[in-house]
Image (cartoon, grey):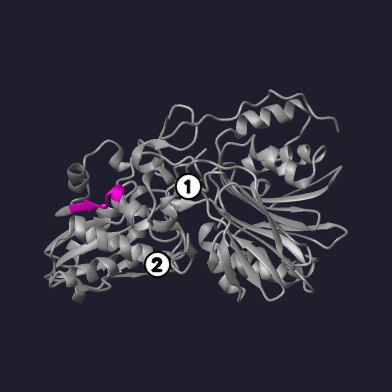
Amino acid sequence: MVTGRDDSHHHIGGPTEKCGVVGVALGGRDAARPLYYSLYALQHRGQESAGIVTHDGFQQHSHVQMGLVGDAFDADDLDGLKGEAGIGHVRYPTAGDVSKSCAQPFAVSFKSGSLGLAHNGNLVNADELRDELENFGHAFTSTGDTEVIAHDLARNLLEEDLVRAVKRTMERIHGSYALTIMHDETVLGVRDPEGNRPLCIGKLDDGYVLASESAAIDTLDGELVRDVKPGELVVLDPDGSGFDSYQLVERDNTAHCFFEHIYFARPDSVMNDTLVYEVRRGLGRKLWEENGVDTDVVMPVPDSGRAFASGYAEAAQEDDATVEFAEGLMKNRYVGRTFIMPTQDERERAVRLKLNPIKSTVEGKSVTLIDDSIVRGTTSNQLVQLLYDAGATEVHMRIGAPPIVAPCYMGINMATREELIASDKSVEEVRDTIDADSLGYLSIDAVAEVLEKSRADLCLGCVTGEYPYDIDGEETDRDVSRPVVGAEAPLSD
């Protein structure tokens, strides 16, 4: 389900996230351009493909292309997407092929109307649902799990109204999902019962918007209303006048992905009523509290380490440490991805192409380098060496997350256990591998404290090896079992 490709869009060697979703319902103007701008705001969540589906009250219109948002659409494409309601998607693949067949939104027409679906997350039981639906005569055109949700929902819509059909599908799919769905001209948003993936509601002057992050709402000059609740269905009025809410499934505990706050979300987004940038600064402060080391300079790995380093340095200075916060690594934003480099030597060279040390900041000084995570460790090793080559006398590495010891099955490309450096090494062994003078991670309890959540309400699978979903061959951190598939008789067409 989760590939092990070495790619990064925030910095080299980091994890990659699956998708960003958006949906709008407006009164009096076409939705295509607001959707387009929203996808630009969510581009960090996926760079493999982009798509928009709209409905003009009579028929559905769709445009989906590989590539970045700016390359996937031109003015004529947007002009052809008629209708005041629509959904959009940017994708980074973790389930399904890297091809247009798996690009989203996924659109389908069936006896009860037209359906478009955009999905952020990953289903654990997609294969068994696909097998069942194929036995019922459904023909699939892609290998992704999104089409499985679309077919299951379309099947349920043959016998149920919209709300009951969504509830029935939610009771059958198991895993993480934040969905924006278009049924004819009605846009709806659904968040999985554990709330693993983010989704929020925004109000515009002439309508409402659903989006993975509030930064997309800001782009449209809108106002954040609130997060969609775990297990909630939100149905936007087609004329943009309001929305209805249905709490379809409830759980005792949530499973919010803590990595959204640490890495994936834009720092200017608000999640769980808190600005992500301030959360990261708070995590940086805890990092000093737990693992502070008094050095001459504190510097971030750009861009994802910046807020952590700011909070860390501020807390250090409050403790009368003489540390200076400085930008010691400059990023070249015009270099391609590291995974297209065919040899390891070229991949290592790519680090030097992307990041260049500022010698005057580093030379003759002890340095604390702060990043959000260590995945494979190769990039950290290269960064430490870069700073030594630039004249640093000491390099101490501090990480704003706990050690990543297990893969993610919830829609994040986090590599396999064999590739994760911390899965079979102690902190001291990792330190030795990356050749730093010292290494310190943030504790799980510190993450929970800063997020103001109990550990029981977070998805911590990648740092504990115990998951909030029933995954073959893995331990769970709660009493959970996947739905039984195939127990029902097939619905009639």
Q: Where does the image place residue 257, in percent across and percent down from the top left?
A: 45, 49
Provide the secondary structure element on which disc 1 rests.
strand
Q: Which residues are magenta?
A: 439-445
Q: Residues within 10 Å of mark 2 (few under 14, many from 20)?
A: many
Q: Residues within 10 Å of mark 1 (few under 14, many from 20)?
A: many
Which of the two discs, 2 and 1, sits closer to the camera?
A: 2
141 in the magenta segment: no
- Spatial CA distance of label 2 from label 1 is 21 Å
Q: Viewed as shown, does residue 427 lie left or right of 237? A: left
Q: Viewed as shown, does residue 416 lie left or right of 90? A: left
Provide the secondary structure element on which disc 2 rests.
helix
Q: Say whether residue 259 is visible.
A: yes
Q: Look at 75% across and 63% down and name the residue there.
A: 85
- Mark 1 — residue? 412
Q: Look at 20% across and 59% down and name the residue there.
A: 289
Q: Is residue 172 above or below residue 430?
A: above
Residue 419: quarter of image: top left
Q: Look at 33% across and 46% down and name the residue there.
A: 376
Q: Viewed as shown, does residue 434 lie left or right of 194? A: left
- Mark 2 — residue? 277
Amino acid at pointer 1:
Ile
Q: Is residue 15 above or below residue 323?
A: above
Which one is in front, 134 or 445?
A: 445
Amino acid at pointer 2:
Tyr
